[in-house]
């Protein structure tokens, strides 16, 4: 991040919760977040929390 003029700024970073998932189609285990989790390996939506 770049700041011109030397002004102070306050940056707050929220903690993002990541959940471990397993794909029922290909067996891949991965970390995901959000409401619609998709397997990064086979792009299936058939995933469950591991």
Image (cartoon, grey):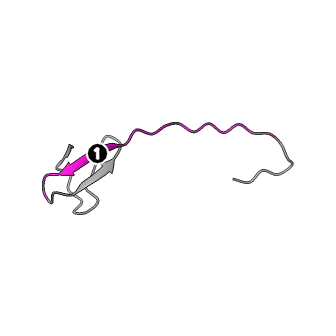
Seen at 74% across and 54% down, the residue is: 2
Residue under label 1: 20
Seen at 28% across and 47% down, the residue is: 37
Q: Position of residue 3 (x, y in %)?
A: 78, 50
Q: Position of residue 23 (x, y in %)?
A: 18, 53
Classify residue 1 as left or right of residue 27: right
Question: Counting other residues with Cα less than 10 Å from the Cα at mark 1, is it few (<14), some (14-19), or many (20 or more)?
Answer: few
Look at the image and tell me in which quarter the C terminus lies.
top left
Residue lying furthest left: 25
Q: Position of residue 13 (x, y in %)?
A: 57, 39
Q: Which residues are magenta?
A: 8-25
* Dominant secondary-structure state across the stretch colored magenta: loop
14 part of magenta stretch: yes
Say what secondary structure mark 1 lies in.
Answer: strand
12 part of magenta stretch: yes
Q: Quadrant of residue 10?
A: top right
Which of the pair 21/35 is nearer the observer? 21
């Amino acid at each position: 991040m770049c700041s011109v003029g030397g002004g102070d700024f306050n940056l707050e970073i929220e903690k993002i919760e990541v959940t471990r998932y397993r794909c029922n189609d290909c067996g891949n285990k991965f970390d995901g977040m959000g409401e619609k989790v998709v397997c990064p390996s086979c792009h299936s939506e058939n995933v469950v929390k591991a």
